[in-house]
Structures are given as structure tokens and as C-alpha cells.
Amino acid sequence: MPVSIIIPCFNRYELTAACVDSIQQHSPDHEIVLVDNGSTDETRFANVTIRNDKNRGFAVACNQGAEAATHDLLVFLNNDTIVHQNWLAFVRNLSRDDVGCVGPKLIFPSGRIQSAGVGINFDNPPGREAFNLHTDWSSEAVEVAAVTGACLGIRRDVFVELGGFDTGFWNGYEDVDLCLAATAAGYSNIYDPVAKVTHLESQSGPERWTAVAANVDRLRHKWSPK
């Protein structure tokens, strides 16, 4: 099935260009929806789908991209990623009605595993309640607490049902929150190692770190059982 690939970006045009090039090489038949969050570098001259006059954050940009997308399968992808052959294979899991969010194996440029799904434990200290799983412990698709928004797939109807990304978060924990909302609605979140995406992680800019404490507080207030 065709997929809409939604990429929010803010400056770092060279990363976006490399990401788009890798998509066009390995999945040329799928739609790319670029959402520019008020870039001041070469990105402002690029052919983007949506252009904001200021940085409105990851959640807003992703929601805008989802609304503009034309396909029923949505993949949210960070612009500091490079995709590989067969990378979209993980969306096969979205054919199951009981599946909410899905994600592939994320790797560092060295090939080392960056994320094999995300674990959640609210008994951990604030700021450590969500953590990447690093062990290559499965060769099959498995259920996990969450998957990272660096590359996250979801059906449009489920995304709308869940209300999209919570714009109360600012460049952090939007993905974990969406996965928890999916679980609360009765869906499973799936990690599928059959697909691989290289993630440079946090190379797209310092904005990710400007509201860490507020994001932690919001996530705990919404979802911590205590």
C-alpha cells in the first residue's frame, strides 16, 4: 500500500536533503510530505509541502503533515535519518486492526543498535521513565511499550482517533505519549526489526532540549499510575 512519509524540518538542510535522497532511492513510489518549521537556511528555498513562518514544534508539524497527506498509512520520519532498502517493510504490521504504532530497528551510523523499541517504567527517576531498548533480542515483530518518533508508522484512522500528537509537548515525548494513548485505546505497539533506518539522533537542532522538564512533567501527569 502507498505510504505518506511526513518529515518535519527546521534548518539543517543538508540532513533533510540526504534523508529525502535516501527515500527516493529506496522507496520512490511513496509520497513525501515536508513540513518546514520556519527555517532560515537553504530549506526555505526547498520544495516543501507546508511552510510555517516560525518553529511550531514537532507535534504541530507532524499533525499538519498528517492532515496534508493523501494516503491512509502515515510514517513520521525525522530529517536526520537515512533509510535503507526495504525500510518500509515494518508497516506490514498496520494490516492488523489491533496495532497502533509501529517502528523499525534504528541504528547508529556505525551499525550499532540505537533503538529496538522503547521501554517505559514510571518507577524510574523523572527523565528516565522511557528508554530505548538496545538488545537485538528478536528477529520477529514483537509488542513493545512504545516506538520512537524518529520513525513511527500508524494508520490515519487510528491517528485521528487518538487525536494526533499532543501539542502540549515540545520536541520530546510526543511519541511516547502517542504510544501510551494507543495502548489505552486497546491497541498494541509493534517493533519490527525486519526494517532498518539509520538515525543520527539529535542532529536536527538544539530545540529538542529546551523543554525537557516540562515534557517529563506532562507525560507523568498524564500516564504515571502514581
Image: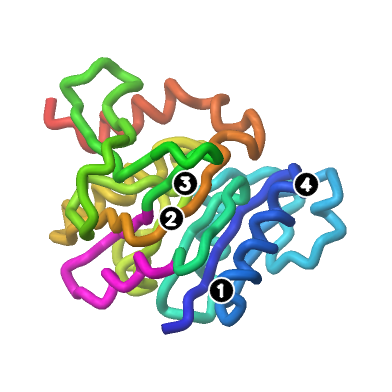
Q: Residue furthest top?
A: 125
Reading the image, the residue beneath label 2 is 196
Which numbered mark, 4 or 2, is in the foreground of this view? 2
Type of the residue with mark 2: Lys
Which residue appears at 21% of the width and 43% of the height?
Answer: 137
Tags 1 and 3 touching, CB below 8 Å = no
Q: Could you tell which of marks 1 and 4 lies nearer the N-terminus?
A: 1
Q: Which mark is residue 167?
A: 3
Neighbor class of circle 2 (other Cα within 10 Å; few <14, some 14-19, many 20+) is many
Q: CA distance from mark 1 to mark 3?
A: 30 Å
Image location of residue 226, percent across then percent down: 13, 25
Tags 3 and 4 touching, CB below 8 Å = no
- Determine whether the residue tagged by mark 2 lies in a helix, strand or loop: strand
Reading the image, the residue beneath label 1 is 27
Type of the residue with mark 4: Ser
Q: Could you tell which of marks 2 and 3 lies nearer the N-terminus?
A: 3
- Compared to residue 4, the image places residue 146 above or below, namely above
Which residue appears at 43% of the width and 48% of the height?
Answer: 149
Q: CA distance from mark 4 to mark 2?
A: 28 Å
Q: Which mark is residue 39?
A: 4
Q: Could you tell which of marks 4 and 2 lies nearer the N-terminus?
A: 4
Does the magenta segment cover residue 24? no
Q: CA distance from mark 2 to mark 3?
A: 28 Å
Q: Could you tell which of marks 1 and 3 lies nearer the N-terminus?
A: 1
Image location of residue 207, percent across then percent down: 61, 32
Q: Could you tell which of marks 3 and 4 lies nearer the N-terminus?
A: 4
Task: Please name whichever residue, 222 or 148, is drawn nearer the observer in this view of the structure.
Answer: 148
- Determine whether the residue tagged by mark 4 lies in a helix, strand or loop: loop
| Magenta-drawn segment | 88-104
Which residue appears at 24% of the width and 57% of the height?
Answer: 190
